[in-house]
Amino acid sequence: MKERLKNFIFQSDGKYTAELKLEEASFGLGKLPTRLLPDGVSKSICGYCSVGCSLDIHIKNNQAVNLTPTRHYPVNLGEACPKGWEALTPLRAMDRAIKPLLRNPNGQLEPVTWARAMEEFVNRFVAIQHKYGKGSVAFISTGQFTNEEMALLGVLAKFGMGFLHGDGNTRQCMATAVTAYKQSFGFDAPPYTYKDLEESDVIVFVGANPCIAHPILWQRVCMNPNHPEIIVVDPRKTETAMAATRHYALNPKSDLTLFYGLAQILIANGWINEKYINGHTIGFADFKNHVQLFSPDLVSQKTGLSMDDILEFAELIHRGKRVSFWWTMGVNQGYEAVRTAQAIINLALMTGNIGRPGTGANSITGQCNAMGSRLFSNTTNLLGGHDFLNSDHRKKIADLLNIKEDCIPRQNSLAYDQIIDGIIQNKIKGLWVIATNPLHSWIEQKTLREQIKNLDFFVVQDMYDTTETAQSADLVFPAAGWGEKEGTFINSERRLGLIKKVAEPPGEAKTDFEIFKLIAYYWGCEQLFTEWTSPKEVFHILKRIAKGQPCDISGIKDYQMLEDRGGIQWPFVLAQETAEPERRLFADGRYYHSDGKARFIFEEIKNNPEPVCDQYPFTLLTGRGSSVQWHTQTRTAKSKILRMLYPQQVYVEINTDDADRYKIRNSQWVTVATRRGRVRAKSFVIPTVKPGQLFMPMHYEQTNQLTLSSFDPYSRQPSYKTCAARISIDEWE
Ligand SMILES: Nc1nc2c(c(=O)[nH]1)N[C@H]1C(S)=C(S)[C@@H](COP(=O)(O)OP(=O)(O)OC[C@H]3O[C@@H](n4cnc5c(=O)[nH]c(N)nc54)[C@H](O)[C@@H]3O)O[C@H]1N2
Ligand SMILES: Nc1nc2c(c(=O)[nH]1)N[C@H]1C(S)=C(S)[C@@H](COP(=O)(O)OP(=O)(O)OC[C@H]3O[C@@H](n4cnc5c(=O)[nH]c(N)nc54)[C@H](O)[C@@H]3O)O[C@H]1N2
Ligand code: SF4
Ligand SMILES: [Mo]
């Protein structure tokens, strides 16, 4: 090990050299050398949400001094939300992780050298694998770093270190859309371009609150010149619902019934596009049979919407010439989520609202590079949308990477929740968590916290060593963040964009890319990565991997081309080099199944796993609280400006009538309890939540102490959006 240490450092071209002395090596080990940043403006894609706005970072004297939204970028056209404007601030936070930390025998985390950290990492993971088998270790990664880093991690862990299991926080977020698209279209392919929001005459948002969660997309809606009907399907009267032309406040998790009911009305009235159905789909006759029973009367009972509302909704879809359907977490996070997403897809297919401007069955993604993790993380599918179970695919990837085919697992990874279950069953003994904060964000958090204690070895790689998850780790790797590295992201509309290095990581923090390369070296599998010298080089590997797939990007020459074109949407093969800056899929009505046809997929309605009852009479909803808070707040809470724009204490929204009934005043401490536990929160009395419902933002740690571990059976995405709860005046007072 020591010998290796002596000989290791990155050169600016990413290659290793053997010139360092031991002392120097153990200090700046494996860190790319400081680069001088030229004065001027450097464009970079925002590192928060999946809208993928471009920001102009202003550089002076080798420092990023300011930023402004890029004016001529097709996504944001000169706009940014407050998180984007404040994107540089979290880099300078006082609690940045600056040294590797190792838990000492007294149970405290103490700083160690990178060399010591690497030794510990390799020795302990190897020992666990030796004792319990290869499958006894797992990683959980993210939708929040670059494609190049995702691919490097995926190849390192699965082909280099022999991990069988690795998943990401994208399971919490996008797994439902992925599964729904794969089954319905034959590939995970959100079909739209943002311009569709400007070209629709009817825009339907289901379980999506873009005014808060995707603010710049909402700006695009506001640019629509057609005075569109904007329909919001959400139990709460959200900011988006207030700005819409119609709001259907259905009962939580009654969406599937509603969409089957709408399909029934459309069919009964002949408001369908038979030519499209016959030419481009399979399974309509069975679907028609299935929805027959969903009469407006029944749908009204189940959804709580009036029959008039339901008929009006169907009529609006029928009257629209260009209807687009957009869904987010209100759909994806549910116990019958995949079928709900597919019910939306079915509506688009049966009315022929797909493949034309202003149409589509469109899932909006969450994190800046969730779309990249769907293609390149090597977790749920083999690199580039390939299949671990398919021997041709394994051979193809092995050949492309110039590695042995038997390095590639012949099985799918366990899903996130199965990895967590594996800990309690003593099957998973080592866990490596990268760029996600599960001890705050995972469902039924208390159980996870207990299970983590059962691990033999727990490693966290994060920008901050103060996160709930890092604080529980045995070993913490200090990571560079957005702004301190380069690479590519893919946004919701399949657009690849470039992020730039505009600041030095603090202390000994390294980019995730560097950390993975360092691990490869210490593990002794660096021969797999001779070509993986820098993100730029890895981008060419990704192009090779994706060639011939629906997500083909082989027409993108290099990073410079991405920059010059204002990002490029996949697919982009050579023939399309002169293509429009905004492109949608399925204009030719051909889907990715081998027969070229989309599928109608449907199923019986399921029972809510935890309905309300006398003891827990409220439905607890959770989600985003404000446009200035990001998830577990590790980044956004570092900005004084953003902090001023949202409540510091955890709060629960309760309807005005319920508050009266329970004698709860506004801004009073209350207790919210579920079968998992109870928390204190400030009451926020507000008519936008319906009677019988409560809403808590996910940004506060307490929220997931209450949620119920339940999952969609196909996507294994957690059902964060509903469980039974009670509320009372503070039981602790
Ligand atoms: N400011 C900010 N923006 C973000 C994020 C953030 O943390 N902060 N996170 C990003 C990420 S990763 C994601 S995934 C997206 C999420 O973006 P969204 O999905 O738009 O946000 P959520 O608030 O989680 O959920 C949307 C809505 O679903 C509704 N809902 C709950 N139950 C149901 C139901 O049964 N049916 C229907 N139809 N609706 C229901 C909720 O009331 C909520 O208003 O936001 C991204 N953007
Ligand atoms: N109750 C409830 N819970 C939810 C949801 C909900 O609606 N309701 N939504 C779910 C959804 S959709 C999501 S996406 C998840 C999000 O949950 P998380 O992924 O846990 O949330 P983040 O706060 O974004 O965590 C990202 C972590 O990565 C670190 N980080 C940022 N950039 C980098 C980097 O470049 N490198 C490294 N190594 N670290 C970095 C940050 O400091 C932070 O600790 O939460 C889920 N949880
Ligand atoms: S909308 Fe999303 S991508 Fe755009 S500035 Fe805000 S957080 Fe960044
Ligand atoms: Mo998400």
Image (cartoon, helix red, strand yellow):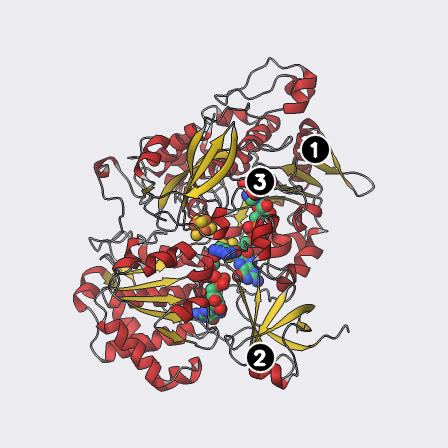
At label 2, which amino acid type do we have? Val
Q: Which residue of the protein is positioned furthest toward the right in this rendering?
A: 106
Q: Can you tell which mark lies on residue 120? A: 1
Q: Quadrant of residue 615?
A: bottom right
At label 1, which amino acid type do we have? Glu
**Residue 684 in the image: above or below residue 2:** below
Q: Quadrant of residue 509?
A: top right
608 vs 603, nearest the viewer: 608
Q: Is the residue under label 2 in contact with that under label 3 (CB below 8 Å)?
A: no
Q: Is residue 243 left or right of residue 349?
A: right
**Residue 605 in the image: above or below residue 172:** below
User: Residue at image x 41%, y 51%?
Assistant: 51
Q: Can you tell which mark lies on residue 388? A: none
Local SS, label 2: loop
Q: Which residue is mark 3?
A: 91
Q: Is residue 129 left or right of residue 57?
A: right
Q: Which residue of the protein is positioned furthest toward the left in this rendering?
A: 275
Task: Indicate the position of residue 505 as horizontal and vertical percent values.
Answer: 58, 33
Task: Indicate the position of residue 294 as horizontal and vertical percent values.
Answer: 35, 80
At label 3, which amino acid type do we have? Leu
Q: Earlier in the sequence, mark 2 or mark 1?
A: 1
Task: Indicate the position of residue 108 as horizontal and vertical percent values.
Answer: 78, 42
